[in-house]
Image (tube, grey):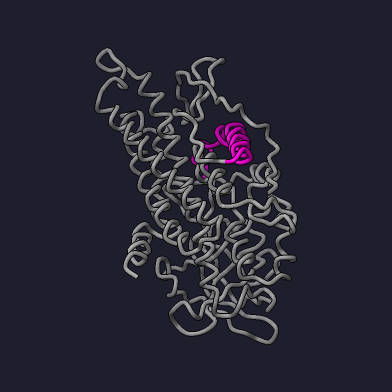
Amino acid sequence: MRVLCRIAPASRSGLTRSRFRFNNGMVAPLNSGAKFAATLFPEPSMNFTEEQLAFRDSVRRMAERHVAPIAAEIDETDRFPTELLKVYGDMGLMQLWVPEKYGGPEGNLTLMCIAREEISRHSPACGSIAGLNTMFIMPLLHFGTEEQRARFLPRIAEGGVVTAIAISEPQAGSDVSAMQTRAVKDGDSYVINGRKQWCSYGVDAEYIVLMARTAGERGASGISAFVLEPKKMKGITFGRHERKMGWRGAPNTPIFLDNVRVPIENLVGEEGKGFRASLRALDLNRPTIGAQCVGLAQGALDVSVAYAKERKQFKQRIADFQGVQFMLADMAMGIEASRALVYECACAGDSGDWDRLNVLASMAKCVASDMAMKATTDAVQIFGGYGYTRDYPVERMMRDAKLAQIFEGTNQIQRVVVARHLLQ
């Protein structure tokens, strides 16, 4: 396995803790000699290999250097931080899943979770750019032809290439089988008409995997997957950027398809079998959402502990009040439990245990996102009135956490998946 880590690894001993002052939503040392703590607990090893630990340290150092300074500004302006594309691409983070035979790093689910957890301590929107190509790569790896892999994956392996997947529609969110976008075969191509909703990064994408109905009116059996090239194909337009509460800086736009002609060689897998491709991609991506939630909650805990040790009321630190201590303890316990579940799920994925991965992916995404929502809400409470202002990072973290309970399948749907597994 070769992972492109071009940022010097951080010291294994970690960064020393100190007191903090807060300004414009960012965290900074009180004095020039202080350093920000990557974690407030002994470093969780999760039985990582030396290579995985070195990878984690490299990603952590990169995030502190390139993500932390712009996290608040990205949330404020809602801009897509394109300057990170080259940074992530050079490290192999965007294209992590591409096999070595196609020029990629040949990473795995554990490495993907590590990368997203570390970056999401500062910004989950920036964390999503790591592994951005996952939802495009997975259908090709598991269901595409060798010709398709040889055609697309070397380009992705170059790094910095934006890709997307288009599944949801205005009336087909949790109920994917209700999609109405239709692809009709016409000679040596398909003609696609319809609309997609919530397409993340699609407006900037070079390639999009799109799901469309090729048979029937409802049900999963008539859905097929296609590779679209929006910068080359006519009839593809994008709507306005959605004005989101959180996770800002990650563009979401509707896609309008008007007689889009797609060559037959861009059909991924068998006609009518595309739903399986989307499910496999989701199963491999949901644990990384859980990892982002762990990172987000860890970031909230770190700043909460630092603030509680500095803020004084009634002539003592608020960290000395048992009520605050209980909130901090609950945050720490939830983070550690969620982290263990995320990486247990990653092990199942890396070993190819697809049946176990399916249920663990739902568990990891659901448990971690519910935990992150509670942890960030408690962080705002610990900060008190200041936590409700945009001069401090915790209100942004709380807004970011909410989306994780909704996208990649709502947490209610994840509970349905788990229950069906138990009752089958």
**View extreme (bottom): residue:** 187
* Span shown in magenta: 49-78
Query: Which quadrant does the C terminus fall into?
Result: bottom left
Q: Residue at x 58, y 35 (%)?
A: 60
Residue 262 part of the magenta-drawn span: no
Against 253, residue 341 (above or below) is above
Q: Where residue 179 appears, x then y in whole percent?
A: 46, 74
- Residue 214 in which image quadrant: bottom right
Q: Quick one: 405 or 38, which is closer to the camera?
A: 38
Q: Quick one: 375 or 72, which is closer to the camera?
A: 375
- Residue 100 in which image quadrant: bottom right
Against 286, residue 332 (above or below) is above
Q: Quick one: 397 or 147, which is closer to the camera?
A: 147
Q: Where residue 46 appears, x then y in whole percent?
A: 50, 40
Residue 240: tell me if it is visible. Answer: no
Label count reads 0
Against 118, residue 98 (above or below) is below
Q: Which residue is drawn at 41% across and 24% down?
A: 306
Q: Residue at x 60, y 78 (%)?
A: 270
63 relative to 6 in the view: left or right:
left
Residue 157: tell me if it is visible. Answer: yes
Overall secondary structure of the magenta section? helix
Residue 55 part of the magenta-drawn span: yes
Q: Where residue 34 appears, x then y in whole percent?
A: 53, 17
**View extreme (top): residue:** 315
35 relative to 144 in the view: left or right:
left
- Residue 327 in which image quadrant: top left
